[in-house]
Each structure stands twice: as C-alpha cells, then as structure tokens.
Amino acid sequence: MRANQWQRGILIGVLLLVLFWLVSLIWGLAGKAQIAVSQATDAKRQYQALEARKSALAASLAALDTSRGRDAAIRTAFGVARPGEEVIVVVPPATATPTTTPSWWEKVLNWF
C-alpha cells in the first residue's frame, strides 16, 4: 500500500511538472504572437505611408511632365523670373496701437 502511494505521488509530481512546462510554453507562444501582431500592424502602417508617398510622388512627376510644371519647379527652387517680370511683396497692414495718456498713478509708478 505504501509503494502504491509513492507511485501515485511520483505520477502526480511528474504530471505537475509536465503541466508547468506546457503552461510556460503556451505563455511564451502567446508573447511571441503578441509581438508578431504588433509588428504586422507596424508593417501595415508603414506600407500605407509608403503608398501615400508613392501617390504624392507620382502626382509630382505628372506635374513636372508639363512645361508649366517644370517652369514652376525651377522658379520655386532657384527664385528666378522671366525677363520683364517684377517682384511683388505683400506687406500686412500695420496694426494701430491706441495712444492713451497714462494716468497720474502710472506716472508715479513709472517714476520709481
């Protein structure tokens, strides 16, 4: 009877060790799956950003394909103008500052 209890104890111990080992394997796989999912979403986000950049570059190339687009790019990049053109500078309107005379106590405080 005592040997039977030892066998059951050893069997339960081995089963607990196997259970602990399986749980640790599952825990590791879950962590790896979470990392894989986050990397997949990052890759998808990067792909979408690259696709947007690709479409913007394609639009720029299409604009540069015309003579007007090339002319505009040269003017923007080098700040050149055609003969006879003049530079127009737009100046914002000046803000009017109200002119008030300081009160007697402001004069006294400024004197100190």
Image: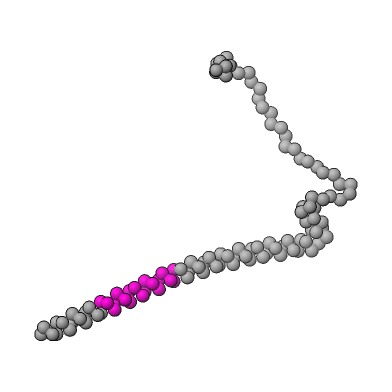
Specify whether residue 106 is in view.
Answer: no
Image location of residue 36, percent across then percent down: 47, 70
14 within the magenta span: no
Q: Please identify the quadrant where the C terminus is shown.
A: top right
Horizontally, residue 106 falls left or right of residue 87, namely left
Q: Which stretch appears magenta?
A: 16-34
Specify whether residue 5 is in view.
Answer: yes
**Residue positioned most to the right:** 84
Establish if 1 lies above or below 89. Answer: below
Image location of residue 68, percent across then percent down: 82, 58
Horizontally, residue 64 falls left or right of residue 49, namely right
Q: Which residue: 18% across, 82% down?
A: 8
Image location of residue 16, percent across then percent down: 25, 76
Establish if 12 lies above or below 104. Answer: below
Establish if 12 lies above or below 100. Answer: below
Establish if 89 lies above or below 111. Answer: below
33 within the magenta span: yes
Image location of residue 29, percent across then percent down: 40, 73
Q: Which residue: 53% across, 65% down?
A: 42
How many numbered discs sit on the rendered protein?
0
Q: Which residue: 65% across, 25% down?
A: 98
Q: Please identify the quadrant where the N terminus is shown.
A: bottom left
Horizontally, residue 25 falls left or right of residue 98, namely left
* Colouring mode (rainbow / by chain / secondary structure / one colour): one colour
For residue 64, what is the image quadrant?
bottom right
> What secondary structure do most residues of the magenta stretch adopt?
helix
